Amino acid sequence: MSFSLESGPHSVGYSDVTLTDLTLPAGGNFGGATGLTTAARIYYPSATGGEDAAATTDPEKWPGITYTHGRLYNTADNITATNHLRATGVIHHLVSHGFVVISINMTLVDRFQSYLLEARAVIVNAGLRYLKSGVEIGGVTLANLVDGSRLGTLGHSRGGAAAVAADHFGADDIEISAVACISPVEGLEIATDKPIFILYGALDDDVSSGDPVKIFERCSGWKTFAYLDGASHFHFSDDLTVDMAVLSRARHSAVASAYCSAFFLATLKGDPSRDDALTGDLLYGDPEVKLSFQHKSGTSMRIDAFETELQQPNSLGGPRNATGFNLAISGQELDIPHLGFFSDVQRGLILRWNSGAAAVYETQFSPMELLATQVLTFRLSQLRPMGNSALLEDILIAVELEDLAGQTATVRSDSAGFSSTPFASRNPFWVTPEDIPADRLIYVQTFRKDIFGSCRLPVAMFKAANTRFDLGKVVALRFRFPDLSGTIIMDDICIEEGVKRIV
């Protein structure tokens, strides 16, 4: 059965507050603006629930979390004034499990028309600072209700980027312990070394260039990534409907609630009982939800990067070659444009199949010691028709290692331990057809759709495939593509350290 996490024992009380005397960073459109205010709502555990209900206290106090929404525009002031009230599902679920959440209206920053995430980080940290204050909520001061040493950030879209940025830019009096994002945008080259969880939908029609994967790969601490097939962008909110979701809004909310709650229970409360979900050990049977998990420490040794001609040595000084392909390095022969390529990489190896050929890519190196705890990673991209899911499940690869004695070990990409986190890179535009109300925008997919996957294969699987194989003296790596035709792009073959548990 698929993972689910029932609501906790607490009802949800809430109080509306105002963050005051905000000072935004100098530069850009901000100009060091001071004395600003913005609305927020604090949600907290309560026996009865409701507005200004009596708070339920805990001897160890509750962990505190900020929630920040994305860039939501509407001409009606009553919409922009309540942008922070559009994620009640995940917030209520967190509170029911014993967290205090402050949801902050970020429209103030949007009105400055800036993509500078530092301004959002300032406001997020102001919210965390508020949770440590002496303000009374539900009959209890926040300082006596919230444990200021156990703080986390959570956000959606640009608010997801703000959740990361709050730790990236930092504040001397705030220590963030965990970060969770739902479909975050990129903005700046932000990252965190704190535990991070990212949820991304395969049909996200707003953050459609893989920004969540870029952020994920840049972060250097314990991390996990959930890729939700059939999910889009705006359905993670309570009522925004401009997107192409396949899953219901209720299903979006249920998945976000379950995994964000499991993540914060593990990181802020030290509860390891949901580690099977967070580390990908849980088996899933739900046909509408496909979750892909990754774990790494940030330590990486690159074997092949494909930033130069194929004929040049690989990153370890060894030869590389390919048969059964017509080859090109993207960015040099741009019949397949590099626009939208994975992450910040502008070049990769273009592989075009020759008719009837057995396609193999090989890279060789001096004897290298691999550890069973390490992970082999690489990226793939393939052109796909519009409207298809971005999952890579129909691309079959046989990955082979060879040791100094000539022993080989082969693992296929359809093996249980193989995982990939793809995303859809599109060329979209917004239109307002004549038969659609003037206040409703429709998102249209155009041109091609590039599918990139950050693929991960535990090295231990090779030893399991051939017990005589010597991981201490590996001399070659091969990719065999037995059934695929057409064109793909491959990039960044690496060996990375694996990380398993949070606690």
Image (tube, grey):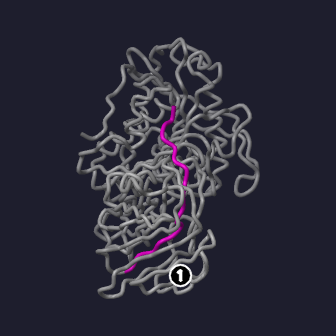
Q: Amino acid at mark 1?
A: Ile
Residue 92 position in % (x across, y down): 40, 30
Residue 63 position in % (x across, y down): 54, 25
Task: Look at the image and give the residue range highlighted in magenta.
Answer: 487-503
Q: Nearer the viewer, residue 184 or 304?
A: 304
Tag 1 residue: 329
Q: Give me the residue at 56% from left, 44% from top.
A: 106
Q: Is 227 above or below relative to 78?
A: below
Q: Give me the residue at 31% from left, 75% from top.
A: 484
Residue 315 position in % (x across, y down): 62, 70
Residue 225 position in % (x across, y down): 45, 49
Left or right: 74 as drawn, with respect to 397:
right
Which quadrant of the figure contains the N terminus? top left
Q: Nearer the viewer, residue 208 or 348?
A: 348
Q: Nearer the viewer, residue 16 or 90?
A: 90
Q: Answer whether residue 57 is magenta in the image.
A: no
